[in-house]
Image: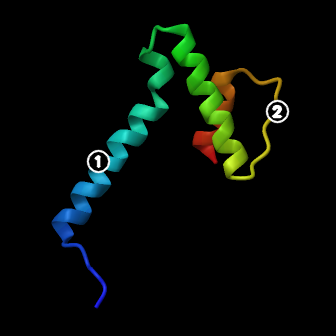
Amino acid sequence: MPFIASKIADFILNFIISLDEQEFKEFDLYETNEEDIKTYYNYVRLLYLLFNMNYDSDYDGKKVKNNLSEA
């Protein structure tokens, strides 16, 4: 018999995931360490590769991040 999470557990998991997603989207807005921001943008570019999406390599990190959020 497969495990079925309760409605409360499902709600809490979705809440946690949405908070993590929001934090990821806003990371570059609040981070001040330039090296961490560069690493973040490289991570976003890796997500493009993992999802087999194309991006313009001439775009700056913010534009690449915004395009990923819209996809």
* Position above or below: 57 against 28: below
Around disc 2, counting alpha carbons within 10 Å, would you say few (fewer than 14), some (14 to 19), or many (20 or more)?
A: few
**Amino acid marked by disc 2:** Asp
- Residue in the foreground of this view, choosing between 23 and 67: 23
Q: Residues within 10 Å of mark 1 (few under 14, many from 20)?
A: few
- Residue 43 visible in the picture: yes
Give the CA distance from mark 2 to mark 1: 32 Å
Residue 38 coordinates in the image, percent (x, y): 61, 18
Q: How is the image coloured?
A: rainbow
Q: Residue at x 57, y 41 (%)?
A: 69
Residue at position x 20%, y 64% from top? 9
Q: Is disc 2 placed on a helix, strand or loop?
A: loop
On the image, the x and y values in percent for residue 52 come to: 74, 52
Would you place residue 12 above or below residue 20 in this image?
below
Q: Which residue is mark 1?
A: 16
Q: Earlier in the sequence, mark 2 or mark 1?
A: 1
Residue 4 lies left or right of residue 57; in this view the side is left
Residue at 46% across, 24% down? 27
Could you say which quadrant of the image residue 24 lies in?
top left
User: Which residue corresponds to mark 2?
Assistant: 56
Q: Look at the numbered disc 1 and give the secondary structure of its residue.
A: helix
Say if residue 66 shows up in the picture.
no
13 w.r.t. 26: above or below: below
Look at the picture and state if 12 lies above or below 28. below
| Residue type beneath disc 1 | Ile
In the rendered image, the quadrant that contains the N terminus is bottom left
Tell me residue 44's x, y (percent): 62, 34
